[in-house]
Amino acid sequence: MDTPQTPPGGPGELETRDMLLNVGPAHPAMHGIVRIVVKLDGEQVEDADVEIGYLHRGFEKMAETVDYNGVMPYTDRLNYVSPLINNMGYCMAVEKLLGLSVPKRCHYIRVILSEISRITDHLTCVGAGAMELGAFTVFLYMIKAREYLWELVEMVTGARLTVSFCRVGGVKSDLPEGFAERCGQALRETRKVLTEVDRLLTRNRIFVDRMSGTGTISAEDAISHGITGPFLRGSGVAYDVRKECPYSVYDQMDFDVPIGTRGDNLDRYMVRMEEMEQSMRIIEQALRQIPPGPILAGSETGRPMAASEMVDQGKIGNIRSIADTRAVTDPTLEGAARPQHPSIAAGEKRVFLPPKEDTYGNIEGLMQHFKLVMYGHGVRPPKGEVYFPVEGANGELGFYVVSDGGNTPYRVRVRPPCFAIMSALPKLLVGDMMADVTPTFGSVNMIGGELDR
Amino acid sequence: MFGDAGFLTSRIEEAIGWARKFSIFQYPFVTACCGMEYMATACSHYDVDRFGAGLPRFSPRQADVLFVVGTISHKMLPVLKRIYDQMAEPKWVVSFGVCTCTGGFYDNYATVMGIDTIMPVDVYIPGCPPRPEYVLDGLLKLQAKMQAQHSSGRRPEPEPRPEFE
Amino acid sequence: MNADALIQAVKDRFPQGVIASHCYRGDATVLLGREVLPEVARTLKTDPAFQMNFLMDLTAVDFSAFGTRPSPAFFNSSGVGMGPRPQIPDQDPWPGPPGPARFLVVYHFFSLPLKHRLRLEVPLDEADLEVDSLTSLWAGANWLEREVWDMFGIRFRGHPDLKRILMYEEFVGHPLRKDYPVNKRQPLIGPRN
């Protein structure tokens, strides 16, 4: 470690030693916490060692203590910049275990929101990466675009970041009215931002010089490490889970998979920029192809009645008089009314909660709600194990779920895409200079919640 | 609290408090999902720069407010404590997000159930993650606290802590 | 190859090493003895019939608490008795946990040229928790095996540097085992609550 090297020009020249530099857990690159110990010879990186685990929050252990729908908030916080993709992956894994299929409209809703999440992830990655190279304006523009998309997500799900939107057997609620126009507006704004950023960065001499030729990895090395996603596609391998092993309605979407050639940081940046455009294409196609939801026409059938009153009437036995009313519930439950239920939920009563009109209005709905919500009851898949991969923003995100027939999962394993990329980080850093650590680490898009779970 | 301050000293203390609260140099100790909302608060939409807190200092020696953003695990805690110790007085700690306030819903072997187990916290901002409006509300509370604090930077003595190894 | 053909091909090559196999919900799964694991892995990677160039995932499951959680007495029907989806060739029931073995090391492979997936499972007894490392074949196995060591305590023979990856070195125990209580904390600094 500290051995002085023989100077090249013979004795009389400068004597040098290697330096160990600790780019410690708390460092300014706002990507999360990881420790990289680099061995430097001047500015050249000779060796690098990566230590992770600073955000280990025990996702897999917690998933064994709550029931199947209770794991949903934990999955949000895995890759917290694209939470809907994680939600969708977990739900589809459990649905595969149950052998359940969800309605078409539900698939489209999930796909639209997943692609919005993918765009927000790439915006954050490229923005933060550019900020570390000094392009602070790009970061501000991309966060502005991300805010538009988050407002869109909030319109549908109620939350900006940690949404817990998907449920086993469906989604929480239908798309609200006016979603298609708002979505169109948000995508127009995002396209403007992307054009602006493209003008600022793609042919910018400083950006290109710093990003091209650094952080190179060959396709064989990447495959050997298990790297997938934009990282692998930057090295020239066309593997996208949405194309190779299509799930949900991706086989009916027409989109391209951008591939790089040299496997350096600049190619990965270009791949991400292009992927955002392709995601927007998918969203527009999905909005055209989505099967129409029920026409609510401003008010559903039946006269409105406060939910508490409906419960009270039911308790004293006036079942017939509340038969054609509709429950007026909290605004956060909007979008899950009885006419919308067939389009957002698989019609299996042992898996999905009933609409509130049934919960408050008749005894069967109440029992169904009870059987799913009370402690000790809940969704009970058959005994078995299943693995389901989806295309996360960083690569193949796989969920391996083992069930023992009880109401809590027996084992939930998430295959984190950036774990593989971080294991290859020493290979990416060695040979480059100290200043190249920043753009390389930026293009890794390490998300601590996913890496350490 | 101002003891035997006269007219001039209390005016000076108000002025010092005013200067401190409108020039916050924060150290954003960002670990997890709350970092995304921290970024959103710091950027153009919910600009935190208009409150004077827009310049993060990424060195604890130069910062005066430690924003602990996101879950702290037991592996990370010694690092956080060292950073807190490296900051010079007067310093304040803001606990951003429910994971730092009380541990959140990660009640397991790896997570610290609230950073106030090892350091005094001035403002707690709960939320998972808190909306930017919440964060700005917390920031305003912090500013009020800074204004009211004695100018020497001493805070009221906390209750005696039990000894731990 | 589709899932059944894949299982059959593995069984044909290694008839003595394969303990069991199934195709539950369309996922081709083969249970192997741990002696044949390095051989099988090498074949899977290099043989043109398999060409499994991706080691997608390497994990473990602890079966010591399987089926032991009590269920309410009046809730006997377990699961959703739905018909399988038409595109999943189901009707291959899950054989259940691997007998007396407590741990199961699970490997997920994927072949990009041939686009098929395979899951290998190696049952291990508690008394002898060792299995061969696959680091020489796939570089990604390095960190994945370190994580299995950290979380379960399963050693990998031939691993270049088997140390903890997610927890700190002073941590005692292996958290994902079923006998480790969920909120047993071992703080480095701070109060012990």
Image (spheres, coloured by chain):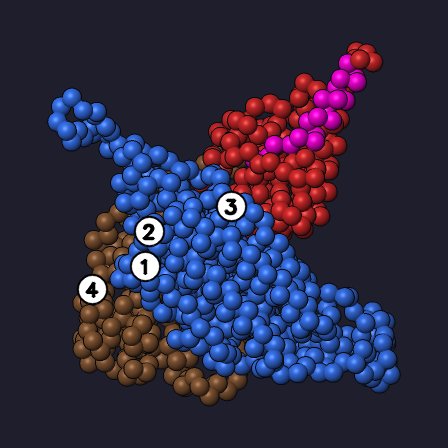
Chain colours: A blue, B red, C brown
Q: Quadrant of the N terminus of chain A?
A: top left
Label 1: which residue? A262
Q: Main secondary structure of the magenta part?
A: helix
Bounds of the magenta span?
A: B9-27
Label 4: which residue? C38
Q: Nearer the viewer, residue A343 or B7?
A: B7
Mark 2: few/some/many CA within 10 Å (<14, 14-19, 20+):
some
Residue C132 in sight from this viewpoint: no
User: Is circle 2 on the same chain as circle 4?
Assistant: no
Of pointers 3 and 2, the one earlier in the residue sequence: 3
Of pointers 1 and 3, the one earlier in the residue sequence: 3
Magenta stretch: includes residue B15 = yes
Q: Is residue A262 left or right of residue A195?
A: left
Task: Determine the secondary structure under disc 3.
Answer: loop
Of pointers 2 and 1, the one earlier in the residue sequence: 2
| Relative image position of residue A35 (x, y in whole percent) | 40, 41
Label 2: which residue? A213
Q: Amino acid at mark 2?
A: Gly
Residue at screen point 33% across, 65% down: A236
Chain of the residue displaying label 4: C
Q: Nearer the viewer, residue C104 or A43?
A: A43
Disc 1 to disc 4, how far (Cα)? 33 Å
Mark 3: few/some/many CA within 10 Å (<14, 14-19, 20+):
some
Residue at screen point 23% across, 80% down: C9
Contact flag, marks 2 and 1 (Cβ < 8 Å): yes
Residue C21 in sight from this viewpoint: yes
Choose top left, top right, bottom left or bottom right for residue A156. bottom right
Residue at screen point 72% across, 72% down: A178
Label 3: which residue? A135
Query: Which callout, 1 or 4, points to the residue nearer the camera?
Result: 1
